Amino acid sequence: MMLRSVCYNLFMIIPPKLKPGDEVRIIAPSCTLPSLGWMDEAFLERAKDYFRSRGCTVSESKHLRERNVFDSTSIQHRIEDLHEAFRDPKVTLMCTIRGGWNCNQLLPHLDYTIIKNNPKIFCGFSDITALANGIHAKTGLVTYSGANFYHFGFGSQMQYTYDAFDRCVMQEEPFEIVPSTHWTSDRYEPAHPELTFKQSEGFWILQEGKAEGVSLGANLCTLQLLHGTEFMPDIRESILFLEDDYESHPRTFDRDFESLTKQPGFDQIRGILIGRFEPCTANGITPMDRVQLEQIVASKSLPKGIPVIANVDFGHTNPIITFPIGGTVRMEAGKGTARIEILVH
């Protein structure tokens, strides 16, 4: 039985870990497979082989290959696929094919009793932030922000991502998040399958302190879609994970971050982890750098003494970690060193 010191949610449900013999279901609660125009069948098979090499079987949700004008499929079909996967006793892991723009549409239509009674590993990132946090808020199920299914087709280029995924969804022991040595913002192109990596600066300590709390968050602008709804998790006693993609820039990130500070319970958060930003923006505005991020953090009314660590390996660059939404995290920042541990996942 977990001790209260590392378990802040007495109603937390941790799904069974993935093991040989289990089934992995590829799902598309946001954009569907055809929207990944660069992903051919060979790439998809390589991604499937990652799980087959671990003794798992892989299946596709019924509507994975549909596509409408929104690069998605109907609410009804996406709900059908989610409910079917949660009900299927063979399925242990649901891995989203990618993110997108619209999975928050699903939140009012889900049967949360089905989800609560059939706990499964649910993993994805970006737009999936809305669904992962909403499911946790409504059921207590620990969900996961991390690799989408397409990540597993990159081979050895993503070994850091794979190791982080395995530690979080295949093992039960606490683990430390260690900075990657190299990272990339390259977009995959079939004609140039090898990504170009650059050396990592490691973690940025923006505010010193020690903390332990519930891990929540992920993509900031998507999390903001939940503000004021029944699907927003209680952020008290939390360590917030925050990141954004190339459509964000310092001005919009600052505004979204400010909105988060106005949420009920923000005065009781325990720490903040900020993911790596992309080195470009969609509209040509200067992208985020350390100086601007330090200014943004300094401008916020943060609870006194909470630690803030940035440039962590999650977000829209590669490689990325997988972390639990609703689990327990410990962080320490000070004297030029930073340490992040996932305790309960």
Image (cartoon, helix red, strand yellow):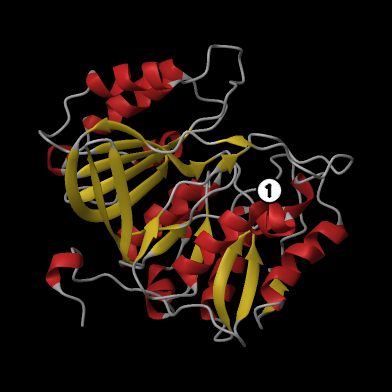
| Number of disc labels | 1
Q: Single out the residue that lies furthest toward the left.
A: 304
Horizontal side of residue 332 vs 245, given as left or right: left
Horizontal side of residue 188 vs 248, given as left or right: right
| Residue at image coords 66%, 38% | 197
Q: Position of residue 175 (x, y in %)?
A: 37, 64
| Residue at image coords 76%, 41% | 188
Residue type, mark 1 in image: Ser
Judged from the image, the secondary structure of the residue bearing numbered disc 1 is loop
Q: Single out the residue that lies furthest toward the right.
A: 191
Q: Position of residue 24 (x, y in %)?
A: 63, 74
| Residue at image coords 79%, 50% | 34
Relative to 227, residue 284 above or below = above
Q: Which residue is mark 1?
A: 72
Q: Residues within 10 Å of mark 1 (few under 14, many from 20)?
A: many
Question: Which image quadrant: the C terminus?
Answer: bottom left
Q: Single out the residue that lies furthest toward the top.
A: 285
Relative to 49, residue 331 above or below = above
Residue 330 can be seen in this image: yes
Residue 101 can be seen in this image: no
Q: Position of residue 172 (x, y in %)?
A: 39, 76
Q: Position of residue 5 (x, y in %)?
A: 13, 66
| Residue at image coords 51%, 41% | 315
**In which quarter of the view is residue 215 placed?**
bottom left
Horizontal side of residue 260 vs 248, given as left or right: left
Horizontal side of residue 167 vs 296, given as left or right: right
Q: Nearer the viewer, residue 148 or 233?
A: 148
Question: Which image quadrant: the N terminus?
Answer: bottom left
